[in-house]
Image (tube, helix red, strand yellow):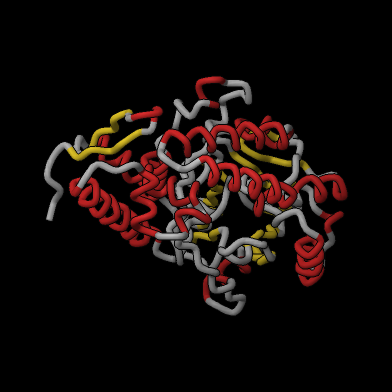
Amino acid sequence: MTGEPPTALPAADWDPHGEPARRAAEQGIHCLPIPTPFAVGRVNAYLIEDDPLTLLDSGPNSGRALDELERALAAHGHRVEDLGLILVSHQHMDHVGLVDILARRSGAEVAALGLLAPWLARYGEFQDADDAFAGAVMARHGIPEETRLALRAVSSAFRGWGAKAQVTRPLAEGDEIVLRDRTLTVHHRPGHSPSDTVFHDPARGTLLAADHLIKHISSNPLIARPLESPPDDVETARGLRRPQALQIYLESLAATKVMDGVDLVLPGHGQAITDHVALIDERARLHARRAGRIHRMIAERPRTAYEIAQAMWGNVAVTQAYLTLSEVLGHTDLLVNDGRVAEVEGPGGVVVLESLREPAS
């Protein structure tokens, strides 16, 4: 039940004539905006003209996406068959859907976080486990059964936009990808997904950040089953081992904020970022404001996370129930960690949130 934030808006497409695009092109990096079926709009794949010829992310598994990717490669004088390395930033289907097709046609290595390799290799099995986990989390936080069943059906229908793939080069934090003209350092930055991976070229001050940091929207830290959990992990399947996705994401942003040698951030959607520190500070303020708003709602009366989502987003909290629930739980986790709110298990095992102290005005 993956997707984009409930507040997602189509990004302004990458500007091929802007200063950031010129700077990237001088480094041999070209953005290839690929169409997706999702509200966020096109996904930015990146062609790195080096040896081996490298592609970061692929777009979703669709004929239209493949056609546009082939045309974009041709515009730079290349074919799919020329690719020697495919980098995977994270597990969301708009980024991995075509990886297997491209790798089979080109014979390229596929490099991705080692923890992600089993998930990609057993895509359908792990998707089943992810959906069961999401269903348990929704039940535990007050989402009605009919809504959970409807979302399970939607998730199953959307799986075709992704596909399994074999990782031939597993990556870990701090690894280096040495190309002819550059060296990319691998950093694991979980939060938006458990597998978010960014690639840093410190010599050129460039960070290939995918969905870790996006200029026009705040990336949704979607609550996801831990990558290290096998599909038959009973405690995880019951939703009892729920990662604090927003807390994890904020820690990842803090690590990116203090990185040396970052002047240009190339994101997975929309426009390039040239002042990542200011943007990360704004994201932190946004989440603090939202946590304060949610605390005030809980102080009025105890509520489930689903009731909070309905109050904040109305019908969107039904049609995008898991996304909005992830948004709420991320912020209530911050409140619980700060001692401002408590989770109390109510009838039927549904968690109710109660205020422990007066919210700030």
- Toward the viewer: 187 or 330? 330
Q: Is residue 249 above or below residue 237?
A: below
Q: Residue 207: in sight, yes or no?
A: no
What residue appears at the point 47 percent right and 36 percent down from the top-left corner?
139
Q: Residue 147: in sight, yes or no?
A: yes
Q: Is residue 85 above or below residue 167?
A: below
Q: Is residue 284 above or below residue 127?
A: below
- Toward the viewer: 144 or 187? 144
Query: Residue 141, how many percent across, how many down?
Result: 41, 38
* 158 left or right, relative to 222: right
What residue appears at the point 78 percent right and 65 percent down from the top-left corner?
64
Query: Residue 200, how many percent across, how many down?
Result: 53, 49
What residue appears at the point 73 percent right and 33 percent down from the top-left corner?
121
What residue appears at the point 52 percent right and 43 percent down from the top-left corner?
193
Query: Residue 122, how many percent across, how many down?
Result: 73, 32
Q: How many marks?
A: 0
Q: Quadrant of the C terminus?
A: bottom left
Q: Which quarter of the picture shows residue 274?
A: bottom left
Query: Residue 297, how many percent across, how many down?
Result: 24, 51
Q: Which quarter of the picture shows residue 140?
A: top left
* 10 left or right, relative to 340: right
Q: Quadrant of the N terminus?
A: top right
- Toward the viewer: 341 or 252? 341
* 68 left or right, relative to 95: right
